[in-house]
Image (cartoon, helix red, strand yellow):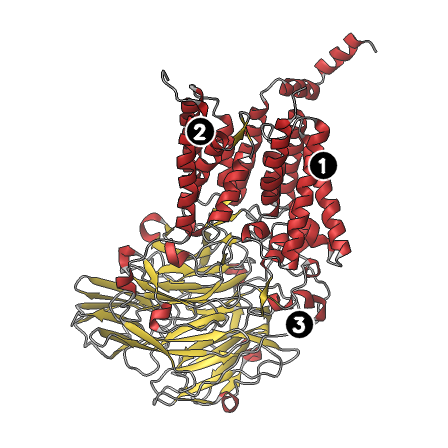
């Protein structure tokens, strides 16, 4: 360099971009400059109508063996669940909430059809499920296990599974013992899945803690053995429905006994081979995908899920970008300054690439300490929105457990595997008072959080999220079960100019609930797929009637239904702005 | 045994031979080997990187910045090995929100350019990686966090890294800094826990974590930013541990510290104590 400036000048010249880089980091910390035009017009409103609907459910968290009292707020931070089922077959979806403290009842809300609900759990025999020696409820899934036209229910607990047969649409009979399902599982999730396509709903139960009795512990070494790669959780279980009122444990035979602290499961035919697969969201570990090999066994496949090992809390399935595929959204933990595990939006490329591709970025990547989530077209414009519940433990606002957590999270596993080694929780919060997120889908422009604009402002510790058209008015209402706090029902009021269509599927060769059926609609340039939900999100189950927004499209060209039996049915030009009942062809 | 016999015995012993040969290698190559080992182990065992684009980007920015600035400032392109070490360290330590890549680019640039801007008497004061991470954690806490537990928490990985780390630190001649810091951490935080009635193990636990493995082998021992003299180096290591203990005390007491101090107390302790010690050291006349 022939004419180099003096050293001080050279340093000053270098200092300019150096300072600019620091300023740029500060600017980028504030996030991108948003285009407010889109977010100001989400095209729907969510109105809290919980009280008006007569829903007064408050969840109560459990209390465990005093030996783990130091971290009880952490261990006992689950159990608020909600599932949707038309248990009396009157065409209107009802709601079932679980409670988690001994003596506190679960609640079954019967939908009167006039916007109000009546609590009937006690008379139905589904209230008193939280008892010493039996366990406390963590969630429930509904499905017609005997194909008698009435939805039965399985309640999973930290404790014994409990299966109830729907006798007459009003009363339930405990058939757990007879069904061979009286198993102690510390479970936070379960799904119905007809894995062998025999027309009977089989049961997959996820396990979190291994099968210890959390009220009578013989050891405090019950925690995970890694914060990102733990394998010492409870063993997930698969039960085959034999059709005679009994279930058989086929976990090992089918190869689905993951011990990865599974918090949630969801099922769909991801690779398009006609057989339902299982997707797991695991806490303290990577997600897992079990591909169904023609009902003979499941094969654990990496599918690109192994490289971002995190804290999976929920898995929601939906067609994120109208590709006619079911993509997976898996929630995780983020806390400013401490950790960004980032939610995953995994695009399904299984049929071609045999993998999922994570495209999560921007706002949907970081919702906070995210729990339940569901896809749903809240504005009926033809693209799915995402509702994400957030917040772990809201206690003393002035005390955070994050610093204490940071001490132990990086430690050697022998230390934190022992619950007694953890710093005592006290009355600290841990990612508490976080708002729910409502992400509006703007296609290639990304997702934008419109929660405040549409009226979602609560700061409860959200857990389960379910979507249902509670008034059969062509809109996806959102029900959130909050941990140790009141549940909320948000009524959805979409732009009235938009059209919609929904389907009421009745299986014949398939299970009567049509759980696992996949519906693809084609309307001009719109192609979208949904699956009839046998349990998804976190501790939740959606309305079994697939709902599609159509925007301004005034007809649907074609509907293709892939029934769990393997039958494919095509409908041409079905009527819109209403429910279409479809009975599976018998042959 | 005569000297000649001893020498011959050493030459026959392959471990001794390797040890002697290692002493002839530029220390930066040993450090580069160790950090590469950590990277490869972390990726193969835990898929820790998430994606390779962040590694490529950080290395590219670090080496390009080093090449450009050294050419501009000194009229020649310097050895890029330290830029490589900074690049790997940053890739491992930075955990941004939503898989964003800009923290790696800005971090790489800040790390290397800090060596050319934050100087005293021709020497840089901050360990480049330490500076970049501290700056990003303070400037962008909503978008950037630091490695905490992504190494999997298992004993085998800990032992491998500590084993290789100690051997290489000994060969490079900085193991006394590592051991002094580790001992000071244990003593001071143990004393803090005892004094305030806190459970002992959680207070000692952090040093077994992955962030500390990178900290004690690649930051606090950086030959370019440590002070002169073995004893002084040990005193500074104690002071850094002392500052960290103070930060941890403040975090326990709920002092209104920026989140960076709570999330990465060791990093911030080095970022505050290290440059002052180096500055004072540079003011001392050379022996």
A354 relative position to A419: left or right: left
Q: Position of residue A161 (x, y in %)?
A: 56, 74
Q: Position of residue A507 (x, y in %)?
A: 33, 75
Residue drawn at x 37%, y 90% as measured from the top left: A112
**Secondary structure of the residue carrying numbered label 3:** loop
B130 relative position to A37: left or right: right
Callout 1 crowding tier (Cα within 10 Å): few <14, some 14–19, many ≥20: some
Mark 3 or 2: the one toward you: 2
Q: Position of residue B1 (x, y in %)?
A: 83, 11
A319 lies above or below A503: above
Q: Nearer the viewer, residue A369 or B279?
A: B279
Upstream in sequence: badge 3 or badge 2: 2
Mark 1 or 3: the one toward you: 1
Q: Which residue is mark 2?
A: A11
Q: Which residue is mark 1?
A: B180
B198 lies above or below A90: above
């Amino acid at each position: 360099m022939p004419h180099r400036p003096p050293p001080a000048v050279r340093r000053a010249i270098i200092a300019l971009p150096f300072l600019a880089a620091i300023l740029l980091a500060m600017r980028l910390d504030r996030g991108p400059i948003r285009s407010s035009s889109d977010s100001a017009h989400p095209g729907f409103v969510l109105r809290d109508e919980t009280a008006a609907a007569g829903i007064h459910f408050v969840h109560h968290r459990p209390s465990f063996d005093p030996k783990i009292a130091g971290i009880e707020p952490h261990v006992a931070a689950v159990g608020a669940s909600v599932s949707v089922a038309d248990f009396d077959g009157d065409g209107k979806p009802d709601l079932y909430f679980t409670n988690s403290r001994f003596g506190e009842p679960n609640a079954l809300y019967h939908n009167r059809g006039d916007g109000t609900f009546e609590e009937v759990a006690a008379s139905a025999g589904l209230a008193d499920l939280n008892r010493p020696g039996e366990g406390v409820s963590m969630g429930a899934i509904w499905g017609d296990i005997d194909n008698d036209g009435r939805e039965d229910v399985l309640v999973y607990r930290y404790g014994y599974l409990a299966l109830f047969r729907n006798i007459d649409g009003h009363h339930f009979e405990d058939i757990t013992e007879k069904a061979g399902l009286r198993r102690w599982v510390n479970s936070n999730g379960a799904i119905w899945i007809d894995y062998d396509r025999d027309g009977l709903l089989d049961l997959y139960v996820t396990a979190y803690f291994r099968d210890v009795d959390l009220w009578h512990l013989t050891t405090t070494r019950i925690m995970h053995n890694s914060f990102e790669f733990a394998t010492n959780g409870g063993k997930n279980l698969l039960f085959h429905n034999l059709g005679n009122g009994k279930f058989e444990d086929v976990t090992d035979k089918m190869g689905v006994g993951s011990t990865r602290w599974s918090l949630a499961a969801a099922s769909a035919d991801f690779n398009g081979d006609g057989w339902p697969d299982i997707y797991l969201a695991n806490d303290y570990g990577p997600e897992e995908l079990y591909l169904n090999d023609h009902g003979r066994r499941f094969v654990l496949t990496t599918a690109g899920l192994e490289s971002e090992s995190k804290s999976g809390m929920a898995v929601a399935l939906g067609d994120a970008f109208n590709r006619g595929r079911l993509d997976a959204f898996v929630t995780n933990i983020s806390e400013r300054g401490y950790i960004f595990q980032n939610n995953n939006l995994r695009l399904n490329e299984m049929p071609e690439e045999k993998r999922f591709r994570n495209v999560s970025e921007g706002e949907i990547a970081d919702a906070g300490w995210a729990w339940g989530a569901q896809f749903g077209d809240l504005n009926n414009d033809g693209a799915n929105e995402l509702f994400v519940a957030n917040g772990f433990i809201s206690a003393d606002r002035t005390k955070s457990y994050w610093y204490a957590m940071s001490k132990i999270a990086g430690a050697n596993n022998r230390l934190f595997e022992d619950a007694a080694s953890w710093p005592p929780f006290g009355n600290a919060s841990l990612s508490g008072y976080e708002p729910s997120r409502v992400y509006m889908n703007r296609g290639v422009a990304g997702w934008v959080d419109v929660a405040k604009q549409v009226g979602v402002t609560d700061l409860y510790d959200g857990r389960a999220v379910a979507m249902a058209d509670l008034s059969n008015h062509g809109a996806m209402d959102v029900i959130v079960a909050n941990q140790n706090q009141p549940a909320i029902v948000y009524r959805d009021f979409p732009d009235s100019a938009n059209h919609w269509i929904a389907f009421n599927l009745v299986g014949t060769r398939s299970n009567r609930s049509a759980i696992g059926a996949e519906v693809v609609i084609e309307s001009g340039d719109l192609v979208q797929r949904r699956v009839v939900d046998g349990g998804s999100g976190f501790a939740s189950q959606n309305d079994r009637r697939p709902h599609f927004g159509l925007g301004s499209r005034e007809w649907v060209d074609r509907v293709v239904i892939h029934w769990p039996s393997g039958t494919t049915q095509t409908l041409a030009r079905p009527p819109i702005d209403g429910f279409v009942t479809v009975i599976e062809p018998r042959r | 045994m005569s000297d000649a016999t001893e020498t011959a015995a050493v030459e026959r012993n392959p471990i001794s031979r390797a040890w002697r040969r290692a002493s002839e290698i530029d220390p930066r190559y040993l450090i580069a080997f160790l950090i590469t080992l950590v990277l490869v182990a972390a990726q193969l065992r835990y898929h820790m990187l998430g994606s390779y684009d962040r590694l490529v980007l950080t290395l590219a920015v670090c080496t390009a910045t080093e090449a450009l600035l050294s050419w501009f400032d000194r009229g020649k392109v310097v050895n890029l090995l330290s830029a490589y070490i900074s690049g790997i360290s940053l890739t491992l330590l930075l955990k941004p929100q939503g898989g964003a890549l800009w923290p790696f680019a800005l971090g790489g640039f800040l790390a290397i350019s800090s060596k050319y801007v934050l100087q005293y008497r021709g020497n840089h004061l901050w360990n480049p990686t330490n500076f970049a991470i501290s700056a990003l954690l303070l400037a962008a806490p909503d978008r950037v966090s630091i490695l905490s537990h992504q190494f999997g928490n298992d004993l085998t990985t800990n032992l491998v890294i500590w084993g290789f780390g100690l051997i290489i630190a000994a060969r490079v001649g900085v193991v006394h800094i590592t051991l002094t810091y580790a001992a000071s951490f244990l003593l001071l935080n143990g004393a803090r826990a005892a004094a305030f009635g806190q459970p002992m193990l959680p207070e000692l636990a952090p040093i077994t974590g992955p962030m500390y493995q990178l900290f004690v082998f690649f930051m606090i021992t950086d030959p370019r930013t440590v002070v002169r003299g073995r004893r002084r180096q040990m005193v500074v290591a104690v002071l850094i541990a002392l500052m960290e203990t103070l930060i941890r005390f403040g975090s326990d007491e709920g002092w209104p510290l920026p989140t960076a101090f709570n999330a990465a107390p060791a990093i911030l302790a080095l970022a505050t104590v290290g440059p002052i010690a180096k500055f004072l050291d540079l003011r001392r006349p050379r022996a």
